[in-house]
Image: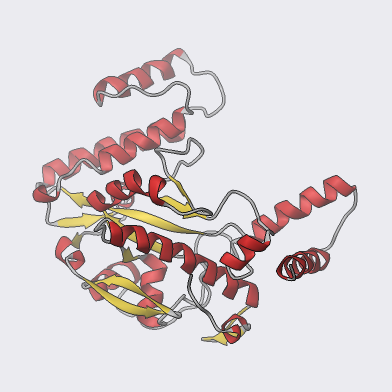
Amino acid sequence: MLSFSDKYFDGEVRDGFFIESKMKRAWAAQLEVLDEIRRICHANNIRYFADWGTLLGAVRHQGFVPWDDDLDICMLRDDYNRFLEIAPGQLSSYFELKSLYNDPTHDNVKCRVITGRSMNFSPEYLNRFHECPYIVGVDIFPVDYIPSDETDTAKLLESIEFVMTAAASLPENAALSEEEKCLVQSIESTFNIHFNRDNRLFHELKKLVDILSSSVKPECSHEVCSMIDLAGGWDYHIPVEWYGESIDMPFENTTIPVPAGYDGILRVKYGDDYMTPVQGFSSHDYPFYRGQEQALKEVIEKEFNTQITEKDLDELISAKIAQAMSH
């Protein structure tokens, strides 16, 4: 378990942005998830790297970007697939893996290691995760190989775009028309696959997107990308040698491996001026735990047939944490 000073959890201003104590505890909890991933990766010779805002934070802030609330890492596709196979059997208690292949409700190509499915106020959980009662996790992105041959790349992207379009257009909860059934059968025939009819069709199509994205072998490639981003129109290619080695960089009170070619990667993803902080938020709602608090608020209001304010909820959560930690 990682060690943090009491002062670490004080609210503070970084780069003109105030980080509340709750976020500091959420950061610490996420770093515990990362430490668990690190344990498994080191035991199985799997490489991983800081990615996206976490990579930017490691290089520019030596920790989280002040206005970021999540932790992202990536793995080259062969390491990513091995992690998906190994992690479910090796994760310690409190941790679980969510991926396309073990969770029919998870529709994202990236996988997540999370600390559960609901807020947890048990003393054991709060002690383990620095008094953070929320579900926290680390996102793990696959880094896919791009075919060296441009014609092969165009064909692969066309296939991925076709399946993604089908996934977006087919009804989620309604019966398929005869035309739609023919489309699904055509996809199965074209890609020599059989969809599990017990799962949602959208989920099965997203799995096919992932299978196609992972179809290029390392020996047939000298560049990598997020294939789903490339198919979606973000035309970036990263030399695979930029991921050839890693460098451990300070990150809050620990370290995180970054690709040796981090400067080039950050320039591709964030522009040449990536070292200049620009305050903003990621695409999801900030802070991530607000949604969990709202769900708890709705449960309380329904159970007790009363309305509570955000301040009441904050006080209730603080009281439950204090009560648990006094045991």
The x and y percentages for residue 113 are: 45, 54
- The answer to whether residue 209 is above or below residue 238 is above
Q: In the displayed structure, does residue 175 sit left or right of residue 47? A: right
Which residue is most to the top? 178
The x and y percentages for residue 260 are: 21, 73
Whether residue 109 is visible to the viewer of this picture, yes or no, is: no
Which residue is most to the front? 327
Image quarter of residue 236? bottom left
- Quarter of the rendering occupied by the C terminus: bottom right
Whether residue 125 is visible to the viewer of this picture, yes or no, is: yes
Q: Residue at x 25, y 23 (%)?
A: 192
The x and y percentages for residue 243 are: 20, 65
The x and y percentages for residue 230 are: 29, 51
Asked whether 85 or 161 is in front, the reply is 85
Q: In the displayed structure, does residue 176 sit left or right of residue 228? A: right
Total labels drawn? 0
Q: Residue at x 77, y 67 (%)?
A: 323
Image quarter of residue 237? bottom left
Image quarter of residue 164? top left
Figure colour scheme: secondary structure
Asked whether 234 or 221 is in front, the reply is 221
